[in-house]
Amino acid sequence: MRLYTLEFEKPIVDLELTIESLRKQAAEQKIDLSGQIKSIEAKLETTRKEIFTNLSPWQRVQLARHPKRPYMLDYLQRIASEFIELHGDRRFGDDHALIGGLATIDDRRVMVIGQQKGRDTKENLMRNFGSPHPEGYRKALRLMQMAEKFDLPVICFIDTPGAYPGVGAEERHIAEAIAVNLREMMVLKTPLIAVVIGEGGSGGALGIGVCDRVLIMENAYYSVISPEGCAAILWKDRANAAQAAAALKISAKDLLELGIVDEVLPEPLGGAHKDYDATAATLKEVLLKNLDKLLDLKQTEMLDARYKKFRKIGVFTKGEPKKKSAAKKKSA
């Protein structure tokens, strides 16, 4: 039995257990059950495709939070030939939830920055479950400005439920730290690429998300608030999280249609955690493609396009107001 099974994956797990049981029976009793096994394997493949090609927004949120999903360091191990981590914000301390440093991807020297979660309780406590403190965002800005100074592109990996909302973070001005990042990233004179690899929660994600290209993995999400938080506010009950996820339009497909993200990166069937290497290969290819496009632009063109990209988000066309009928005018 799997150590971590999502509710919608149970039909798949049941079929896998049936196949495992038949193979065990065939081996112990020395009988040929290959026909039955092939039939169930075919059904398993069909079931897997039906489930994972028709996921709801809430189910994709669950996949984005999967504890086996690859994190920033998992990708760097596969796409970068070298990574040198840099520490500290030069004001307060070093935040382990938001890491960054110099990396080499093929022959490109870049600055990489992103949130990192933990695999077990000890590491999650060290990483603060991927929720950065103010010093994390100040460190990120320091590294971005260093990258600008040395003409290095910046790649940001977004994977956080949100910035840390604790007393210490408020005392050290978490909102101000994020706001300064938003302002300064808009005018940084170096190419910026962001990729949402898991959770893209609220200002904690946007604090490193003002980039020339915003990419997103197929089963990641990017939202102003978590589905549970939205449900608690609108329906006074976190149990309505699935309804909130659909209403928020936080899935990759919806975000692409709304123009919030520029490209959706496909994942292996079942999610990125099913094949780290294949997912990393796709990520590397897309990152290099977008990086080459940005490097071909003049600096003024890049900055102008970045400004226009974010100015147009949220713009909509308002229809003409309905005219009052003659009967209503007369009665008025």
Image (spheres, rainbow, N blue to C red):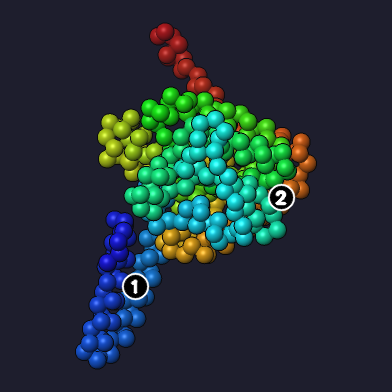
Tag 1, which secondary structure? helix
Q: Is residue 232 left or right of residue 163?
A: left
* Image spot of residue 207 (x, y percent): 53, 35
Place of residue 318 in the rendered image (x, y in percent of width and height, measured from the top left): 55, 27
Element under label 2?
helix
Q: Nearer the viewer, residue 6 or 186?
A: 186
> Which residue shows up at 31% across the image and 56% down it?
6
- Please name the amino acid that badge 2 sits on: Lys
Query: Tag 1: Cα neighbours inside 10 Å, few (<14), some, or many (≥20)?
Result: some
Q: Can residue 39 be seen in this view?
A: yes
- Numbered tag placed on residue 43 in the rendering: 1
- Identity of the residue furthest to the left in this view: 29
Instruction: Please state, as top left, top right, bottom left or bottom right, where the C terminus lies in the image.
Output: top left
Place of residue 147 in the rendered image (x, y in percent of width and height, measured from the top left): 67, 42
Q: Earlier in the sequence, mark 1 or mark 2?
A: 1
Q: Is residue 316 visible?
A: no
Disc 2: which residue:
293
Q: How crowded is mark 2: few (under 14 residues within 10 Å), some or many (20 or more)?
A: few
- Quadrant location, the N terminus: bottom left
